[in-house]
Image (cartoon, helix red, strand yellow):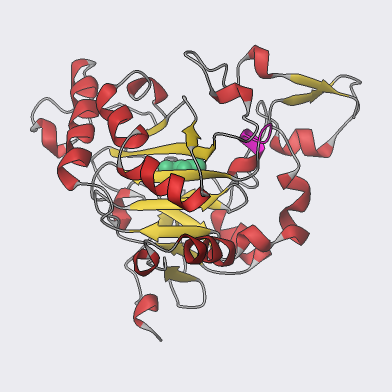
Amino acid sequence: MTTQDVVAPILTYQGRQLITAPTHFGTLRDSRDLLGDADKLRARMEEDGYLYLPAMLDRDAVMDARRSILLKLQAEGALHPDHPLESGIIAPGVHFTFRADLANGNPVIHQLLYSGVIMDFMGEFLGGPVLHYDYTWLRAKAPGPNTATTPHCDIVFMNRGTKQLYTVWTPLDDIPYELGGLIVLENSHRQRDHLGEYWEFDVDTYCVDDKNDEAHERWAWGSGGGSYSKDAIGVRQEIGGRWLSSEYKAGDLLIFSMFTLHASLDNCTDRVRLSTDSRYQLASEAVDERWIGANPIAHGPDAKKGLIC
Ligand SMILES: O=C(O)CCC(=O)C(=O)O
């Protein structure tokens, strides 16, 4: 056993316990030693399907971003009135997991994600001027049994532009295992045999000819919601590899490819788990029109494309 494989505490996904034996679970490889060497960073991305870069962002800037979200949640009554704002303890009966509205148009979040460290890093990593999607995915995961993100690859949501597109997952807090951080399936970005058909899928397509189409029944936005599977435990058994994660700190970045299968753990606390996922690519390459502009169309009606299945 290496220090990378220290046995973790109890981790759950949708109420079920993940096996944390070193054969099934490990920690993310820290790639900070490669900073400043874009070729090596690209090679590591190719090899691992992700780059885990702890302590990249200024912790105070991240905590300011967190506070900007907590203030909005407090104003709408979603935080417990008997606890201080900074605790992030959720009011009884509040259930949400996805709150993009809290990030879009939020200048503190925009400054953190779309200027300075992240943009500079992505420019170096991609080797030219970069653009970011204008849409920011903000996860505000209230506690509860069904809070975990189901296993998916991002390509099915954003495949209408370049495939050299990267997700930056930014914890807006310290996220120990029990708060339900991100998990990445080791080597999944190379599992074409298992995931190849799924990688070709676009969640915003539908069949115009009324044929039964298994892919649309499994993965389309209205049915499967783009998840490859609802079962993180079963999917690891099917594809192989280990689930990888970390006890994230505010300031860490986890960057991954469109083809890397990921999910999250349950939020087993009484606090809200806050993070963003944002996307970056070379400005010179084609862009998926769903995610850019002042009011991105996202998965709305204008995004839908009919197919002869
Ligand atoms: O934060 C999460 O739970 C999910 C994030 C995610 O799916 C992504 O970054 O693409």
- Viewer-closest of 139 and 296: 296
Residue 159 included in the magenta stretch of the image: yes
In this picture, residue 275 sits left or right of residue 198: left
Q: In which quarter of the image is residue 249?
A: bottom left
Q: Quadrant of residue 6?
A: bottom left
- Viewer-closest of 166 and 183: 166
* Number of on-image labels: 0
Q: Position of residue 202 (x, y in %)?
A: 71, 33
Q: Position of residue 71 (x, y in %)?
A: 18, 23
On screen, residue 305 above or below 280 = above
Q: Quadrant of residue 191?
A: bottom right
Farthest-out residue, front: 128
| Residue 260 seen in the current view | yes
Farthest-out residue, bottom: 1
Magenta span of residues: 156-161
In this picture, residue 17 sits left or right of residue 179: right
Please state, as top left, top right, bottom left or bottom right, where the N terminus lies in the image: bottom left
On screen, residue 34 above or below 146 = below
Please state, as top left, top right, bottom left or bottom right, where the C terminus lies in the image: top right
In this picture, residue 297 sits left or right of residue 183: right
| Residue in the picture at 38% in, 29% down | 96
In this picture, residue 103 sits left or right of residue 79: right
Magenta: main secondary structure equals loop
| Residue 141 seen in the current view | no
On screen, residue 177 above or below 148 = below
- Viewer-closest of 72 and 19: 72
| Residue in the picture at 33% in, 22% down | 102
Q: Where is residue 21 in the image (x, y as percent from the top left)?
A: 45, 76
| Residue in the picture at 36% in, 51% down | 253
Residue 279 included in the magenta stretch of the image: no
